[in-house]
Amino acid sequence: MAISAYLKWLRQRVGHALVLMPAVTAVIADDEGRILLAEDLSASQRTLPGGAIDPGERPADAVVREMREELGIEVEPTAVLGVFGGPELVIDYPNGDRVEYVTTVFACRIVAGEPVADGEEIARFQFIIPGDHEELRMAPWAHHVLARIDPGTPEAQFDPPLPSGAADLLGYRAIGK
């Protein structure tokens, strides 16, 4: 599912304007400790799998649903690796839509199934050795997240607060930018 019924409803009201959207991201490691990256069908770049949280949905339920939809697998979230948002997670879509995601990053383990790209959102996937993402064509937000998390650590990560007024200096606070 490329766009949820909720986001479709919201877009009918706000057009292409910037929308703040809660989201989830899955970090799935295989038995060798490699991390699953997905190739986004619309942008032809690698990313971490995940998606938006629907109204009334818990983040853990959303990550389970997204992995089922995108990769045909059942996962169990095992830890929160981090929470990220801000300018690094603003995405301008080819159709003109702007979204700023605030994503909860979950460590997940596969409990049933083998990953298969859905062909709607995910073109293909691969497992990589942590750190090898530096050389890949990736979504900037995914680089940002991977540079800050440690799947082997139970301590959740986040970007520290910006100094007072820094967001205004970046011209970031204005709606519609």
Image (tube, grey):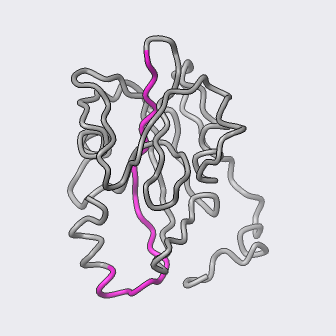
Residue 65 location, x and y as percent?
A: 24, 43
Total marks shown come to: 0
Residue 27 location, x and y as percent?
A: 46, 32
Residue 119 location, x and y as percent?
A: 32, 50
Q: Is residue 168 left or right of residue 101?
A: right
Q: Is residue 30 left or right of residue 162?
A: left
Inspect the magenta stretch and tell me whether residue 169 lies in it. Answer: no
Residue 127 location, x and y as percent?
A: 50, 27
Inspect the magenta stretch and tell me whether residue 27 lies in it. Answer: yes
Q: Is residue 88 above or below residue 112?
A: below
Please report the residue visible at 22 percent of the width from the left and 22 percent of the height from the top.
112
Please report the residue visible at 52 percent of the width from the left and 46 percent of the height from the top.
47
Quadrant including the C terminus: bottom right
Quadrant including the N terminus: bottom left
Q: Of 80 and 9, which appears nearest the observer?
A: 9
Q: Farthest residue toward the top?
A: 31
Q: Is residue 96 left or right of residue 68?
A: right
The range drawn in magenta is 11-30
Please report the residue visible at 30 percent of the width from the left and 35 percent of the height from the top.
116
Q: Is residue 124 above or below residue 89?
A: above
Q: Indicate the quadrant where residue 121 lies.
A: bottom left
Q: Is residue 145 above or below residue 16?
A: above
Q: Indicate the quadrant where residue 134 lies.
A: top right
Please report the residue visible at 72 percent of the width from the left and 38 percent of the height from the top.
135
